[in-house]
């Protein structure tokens, strides 16, 4: 079996509590031995308020044909699965300009997280690069999500012919710029996607049948403004409805075969 489709640990997680950021926990998260890492107070209330005001000025676009609606600022590789990848890389410069316009009024969460990873995990942390022809990916998607169906994010499935398709494991991080007053929980299940799971995908949707996770452990990641939560995005996960806005900035973190960590959205 191809290494990128190999199953990670299917045993019980070591804990269902929030885990702090350190080398041991990060490696455990890559191996699916723990459900998530939380960096509490990653950003101050003032920093988040400034980000929220800047995001409001820019405004959200909404994904086409996605229900329930998800607003976003920036681009995703996922949108270009069945399209020429040149379109994605042509859009990177504009996406970076918009991201920088938002973060220049407060701080850059991606750069802050990269610094934390270099201090705690590896010195080899960078934005993913396709090749000399296409250049670097975009990282730093800003989203307005009130609900998300049960799904997974894994470049081995979504980008087999892209450089990021070579990753051996994949995480996702989210900083909560705005958290709902109630709800908005991200539920992560101890169930890794496998190719045979595609038969459980809902036709015309990104969501999967809930029978896949019916008997699995689940971690409830509560959104708190200013916190960062990192989890293994190959695990099935969903976002429950909340009261109030739920605005995040995020990207994926992939581990390449040589051990380098790369960001992309």
Image (cartoon, helix red, strand yellow):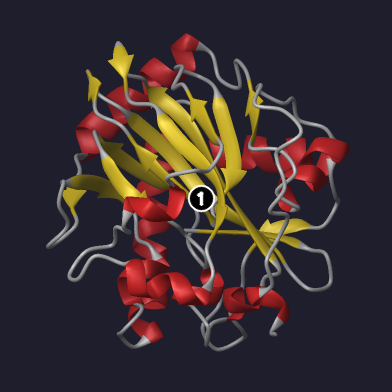
Q: Residue at x 73, y 55 (%)?
A: 9
Q: Residue at x 55, y 77 (%)?
A: 135
Horizontal arrangement in the rendering, residue 68 relative to residue 160 (left or right): left
Please tell me which residue lies in front, 88 or 207.
Answer: 207
Specify few, some or many for label 1: CA neighbours under 10 Å numbering under 14, 14-19, or 20 or more.
Answer: many
* Residue 104 seen from this side: no
Q: Position of residue 95 (x, y in %)?
A: 36, 58
Please tell me which residue lies in front, 226 or 14.
Answer: 14
**Above or below: residue 14 compared with residue 170:** above
Q: In the current view of this chain or complex, which residue is farthest to the front?
A: 215
Q: Quadrant of residue 52?
A: top left
Q: Residue at x 74, y 25 (%)?
A: 20
Please tell me which residue lies in front, 45 or 180.
Answer: 180
Q: Position of residue 229 (x, y in %)?
A: 57, 32
Q: Which residue is mark 1?
A: 251
Q: Position of residue 5 (x, y in %)?
A: 63, 75
């Amino acid at each position: 079996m191809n290494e990128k489709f190999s199953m990670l640990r299917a045993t019980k997680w070591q804990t269902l509590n929030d885990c702090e950021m350190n080398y041991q926990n990060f490696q455990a998260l890559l191996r699916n031995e723990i459900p998530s890492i939380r960096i509490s107070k990653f950003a101050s209330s003032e920093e988040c308020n400034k980000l929220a005001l800047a995001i409001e000025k820019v405004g959200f676009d909404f994904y086409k044909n996605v229900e329930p609606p998800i607003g976003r600022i920036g681009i995703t590789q996922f949108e270009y699965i069945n399209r020429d990848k040149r379109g994605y890389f042509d859009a990177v410069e504009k996406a970076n300009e918009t991201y920088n316009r938002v973060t220049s009024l407060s701080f850059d969460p991606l750069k802050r997280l990269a610094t934390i990873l270099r201090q705690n995990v590896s010195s080899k942390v960078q934005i993913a690069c396709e090749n000399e022809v296409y250049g670097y990916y975009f990282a730093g998607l800003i989203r307005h999500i009130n609900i998300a169906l049960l799904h997974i994010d894994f470049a081995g499935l979504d980008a087999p012919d892209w450089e990021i398709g070579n990753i051996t494991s994949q995480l996702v991080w989210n900083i909560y710029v705005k958290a709902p007053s109630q709800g908005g929980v991200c539920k992560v299940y101890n169930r890794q996607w496998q190719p045979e799971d595609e038969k459980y995908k809902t036709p015309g949707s990104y969501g999967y049948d809930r029978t896949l996770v019916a008997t699995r452990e689940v971690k409830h990641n509560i959104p708190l403004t200013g916190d960062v939560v990192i989890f293994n995005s190959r695990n099935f996960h969903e976002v429950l409805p909340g009261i109030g806005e739920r605005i995040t900035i995020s990207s994926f973190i992939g581990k390449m075969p040589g051990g380098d960590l790369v960001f992309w959205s």
